[in-house]
Image (cartoon, rainbow, N blue to C red):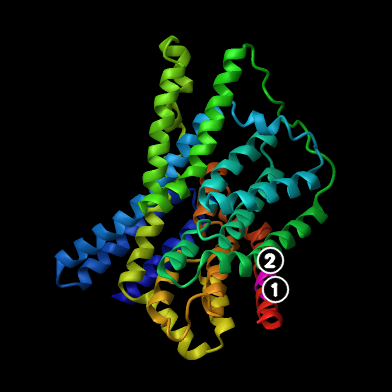
Amino acid sequence: MTTLILITFIVGYLAITAEHGLRINKAAIALLTGVSCWTLYAFTQQDVHLVSHQLAEHVGEISGILFFLMGAMAIVELIDAHDGFDIITSRITTRNKRKLLWLLSTITFFLSAVLDNLTTTIVMVSLVRKLFPASDTRLLFVSVVVIAANAGGAWSPIGDVTTTMLWIGGQITSTATMAHLILPSIVCTVVPCALISIRLKGEVENMPAAKTLNTQSLGRDRNLVFAIGLLSLIFVPVFKSITHLPPYMGILGALGLLWVITELIHAGKDERDKDRFSVLYALRKIDMPSILFFLGILLAIGVLQHTGVLTSTAQWLDQHVGNINLVVIIIGFLSAIVDNVPLVAAAMGMYDMTVYPTDSYFWQFLAYSAGTGGSMLIIGSAAGVAAMGIEKINFMWYLKHVSWLALVGFLAGAAVFILQAFFFA
């Protein structure tokens, strides 16, 4: 039955990649795949209560990600409704495509380390949409945002969920991680950007102009919502560090705060006039099919985790590959296909800290590989899934135009990490 579950997952995965040809929304396929995998898994277990408990536990983990995603999207939509991103776009005066590429990738890289790769992607994709008209060039810039966000999140203990897992588990420390991974992560971003910049020529045509606000009060509203919205997003990792509560609690609290503030700001306006500035409006603009797609994918991967497929894969790699560099690089490739969280969780359970102590070569390399490997496929990371939902990036388009760039960047960063360890050990 495990084989049948694996076949179901693969067929569903292939159907998602062929979404454009099949003309079936990927969310529908993902949900059907997730439910089918859990149904087959239930038939293999005699204890139905155990399956229900495992499902409830897994849905609890998934819901944290989904609530975080919904909260972050709502805050970004609220900032956008108040034209808050014009504060940034109005200061970007260059229309040169190459300069914009380097500017946006640099902002994304460092912002991802402060926030996290998912939130940063949502913010930066919204910004890119403000700067570029709909085109393949815009899709290319959005893809660079995904690569830079994943690379930027890998070298910070709060930038990527897998790095955070290793940090909380005691496998790595914040200072050592930043010292060991910042250079490989920079290379992982710079190499794809350099290759893309060679192909980019000319200037952005028809760049949307920043809106001119008619009144001083509208300007104050915009500045206030932008400042509070951005600060609340930045405060989420701080909230997590102080309270040790999950990040979605911080993002929901931030949304609640911004909700109250926007209600007070627009309290004196007519209901029709203040509707588009409300959180209710922002919530209506959230792309729910993308949320459901994320849910379906994570449900399906959860079955692979409970059936032991991921753990068996990790054990097979350990026994048959042997070379620790190859094992970690392969985990990076696998993280582009399945969620990197269960892969890292399996590795954390397999490799003893008596063999690989805190901040050892293995754990640091694993943090890099799992954090950046997901960029090789658009559905290989939370950042990629978010960008896919917002910008409607086609799986095959990304595979054709971007995957090889992410691959080259990933391998270049891995090579830098290995050489860095060799020369500075």
User: Is residue 153 or residue 146 the one in the foreground?
Assistant: 153
User: Is residue 76 or residue 143 the one in the foreground?
Assistant: 76
Instruction: Name the amino acid type tagged 1.
Output: Val
User: Marks 2 and 1, Cα distance to the nearest angstrom?
Assistant: 8 Å
Q: x, y (%) of residue 75?
A: 48, 35
- Do the residues under discs 2 and 1 have CB atoms within 8 angstroms? yes
Q: Quadrant of residue 401?
A: bottom right
User: Is residue 83 or residue 233 the one in the foreground?
Assistant: 233
Q: x, y (%) of residue 71?
A: 42, 40
Instruction: Name the amino acid type tagged 2.
Output: Leu
Relative to residue 311, is residue 265 depicted above or below? above
Residue at position x 41%, y 14% from top? Answer: 267
Residue at the disc numbered 1: 416
Q: On the picture, is 50 further left or further right than 61?
A: left
Q: On the picture, is 333 further left or further right than 70?
A: right
User: Is residue 397 or residue 321 the one in the foreground?
Assistant: 321
Residue at position x 55%, y 71% from top? Answer: 332
Q: On the picture, is 243 further left or further right than 388?
A: left
Residue at the disc numbered 2: 183
Quarter of the image with the N terminus is bottom left
Q: Which residues are magenta?
A: 411-415
Q: Quadrant of residue 138?
A: top right
Q: Secondary structure at mark 2?
A: helix
Residue 403 in the magenta stretch? The answer is no
